[in-house]
Image (cartoon, rainbow, N blue to C red):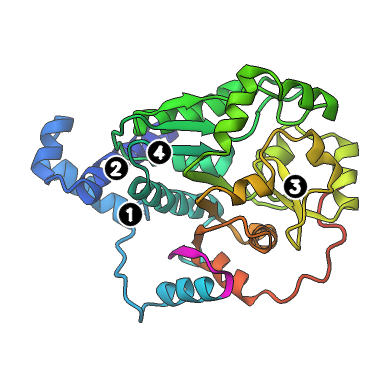
């Protein structure tokens, strides 16, 4: 009989732990075996499993290797630092996301340090990144939630809290949660709440971040963005997004193909920081997986929001192959 889903999930988690210690922390197989109280041969098999299933990518950084050439072209075209993750054409979207998330977790681990503030936008992609974090103890650092998570159906607090907690635990950092709705019913309510000291301190903290970590939301993504599938928007909201030629969102703030966002009505009710606030953060890491997000990503790049991009190879190619986005109409769904 084959492995059950629970057994396979546990095997993947253990393999990630073993691979992180071996490749990122330079532990020997003997040391890992002692730590996990298993045999050395078990560790060897788990490392082999991690490589063959794509949990681990061993990359040679050479200017003659094609992903490196793509990274160079992305830098030339958009002025960003890119990390392109090699993925087979036959891979499914879930496995593609897992590989990109692991690469993003590694990049973040290299950047996060003591006395730093990291802003995190919740979502399916960032949740995958959180599951791949390797422990990196820091001092006097903090994790700041970038956008609220509640809607009319759920508080959203558990989902967002689990994501934020993983970052806090990985970096031994203080977590600042943002206990507000993802979208307010009335812009005036948002403005009033932003004056409350308990909320205003978080809004202020968002403006002094060292790093922001986010994905790009797309109404067309194969792995659905929570904003579009989790009950945050009603039929009227979707209609409004279509009328405004919205192509995506970042931290629940919507934007068009040309990167404009400030005059989109729904943004007046959104809890996330405006794109102008994000652009004020020194390092802004966007994690993107899947070709259905490429159009949304192009709009985000047009808005100058991204400094660092972690993306799968196929999507990176499609991004570079894109011409001018002339067809802006009908980009957002008009139905629930």
Query: Residue at image x 36%, y 36%?
Result: 115
Please identify, in this view, whether the residue under mark 4 or under mark 3 is nearer the observer: 4
Quadrant of residue 265 within the rendered picture: top right
How crowded pointer 4 is (Cα within 10 Å; few <14, some 14-19, many 20+) is rated as: some
Numbered range of the magenta stretch: 77-86
Quadrant of residue 160 within the rendered picture: top right
Quadrant of residue 149 within the rendered picture: top right
Disc 3 versus disc 1: distance between alpha carbons?
Answer: 34 Å
Looking at the image, residue 222 sits to the left or right of residue 5; the answer is right
Mark 3 / mark 2, whichever is N-terminal: 2
Q: Kindly state the secondary structure of the residue where label 1 is placed.
A: loop
Looking at the image, residue 322 sits to the left or right of residue 109; the answer is right
The residue indicated by pointer 1 is: 56
Disc 1 versus disc 4: distance between alpha carbons?
Answer: 28 Å
Mark 1 / mark 4, whichever is N-terminal: 1
How crowded pointer 1 is (Cα within 10 Å; few <14, some 14-19, many 20+) is rated as: many
Nearest the eye: 237 or 273: 273
The residue indicated by pointer 3 is: 254
Mark 3 / mark 1, whichever is N-terminal: 1
Residue 46, given in percent of the width and then of the height, sits at 24, 45
Q: Kindly state the secondary structure of the residue where label 4 is placed.
A: loop
Disc 2 versus disc 4: distance between alpha carbons?
Answer: 30 Å
In the rendering, which numbered label is found on residue 116? 4
Nearest the eye: 6 or 131: 131
Mark 2 / mark 4, whichever is N-terminal: 2
The residue indicated by pointer 2 is: 15
């Amino acid at each position: 009989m084959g492995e059950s889903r629970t057994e396979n999930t546990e095997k993947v988690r253990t393999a990630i732990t073993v691979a992180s210690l071996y490749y990122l922390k330079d532990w020997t197989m003997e040391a890992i075996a002692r730590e996990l109280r298993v045999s050395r041969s078990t560790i060897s098999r788990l490392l082999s499993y991690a490589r063959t299933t794509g949990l681990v990518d061993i990359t040679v950084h050479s200017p003659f290797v094609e992903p490196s050439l793509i990274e160079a072209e992305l830098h030339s075209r958009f002025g960003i630092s890119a990390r392109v993750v090699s993925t087979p054409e036959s891979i499914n979207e879930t496995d593609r996301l897992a590989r990109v998330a692991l690469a993003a977790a590694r990049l973040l681990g290299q950047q996060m340090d003591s006395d730093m503030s990291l802003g995190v936008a919740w979502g399916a992609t960032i949740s995958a990144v959180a599951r791949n974090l390797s422990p990196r103890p820091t001092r006097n650092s903090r994790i700041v939630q970038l956008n609220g998570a509640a809607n009319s159906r759920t508080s959203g607090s558990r989902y967002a809290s689990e994501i934020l907690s993983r970052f806090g635990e990985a970096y031994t950092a203080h977590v600042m949660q943002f206990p507000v709705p993802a979208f307010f019913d009335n812009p005036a309510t948002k403005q009033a709440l932003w004056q409350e000291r308990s909320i205003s301190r978080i809004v202020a903290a968002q403006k002094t971040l060292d790093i922001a970590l986010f994905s790009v939301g797309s109404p067309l993504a194969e792995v659905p963005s929570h904003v579009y599938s989790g009950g945050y928007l009603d039929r009227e909201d979707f209609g409004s997004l279509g009328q405004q030629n919205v192509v995506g969102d970042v931290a629940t703030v919507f934007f068009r193909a040309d990167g404009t966002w400030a005059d989109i009505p729904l943004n007046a009710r959104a809890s996330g920081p405006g794109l102008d606030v994000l652009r004020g953060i020194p390092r802004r890491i966007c994690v993107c997986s899947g070709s259905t997000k490429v159009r949304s990503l192009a709009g985000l790049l047009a808005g100058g929001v991204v400094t660092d991009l972690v993306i799968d190879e196929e999507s990176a190619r499609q991004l570079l192959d894109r011409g001018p986005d002339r067809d802006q109409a009908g980009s957002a769904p008009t139905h629930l």
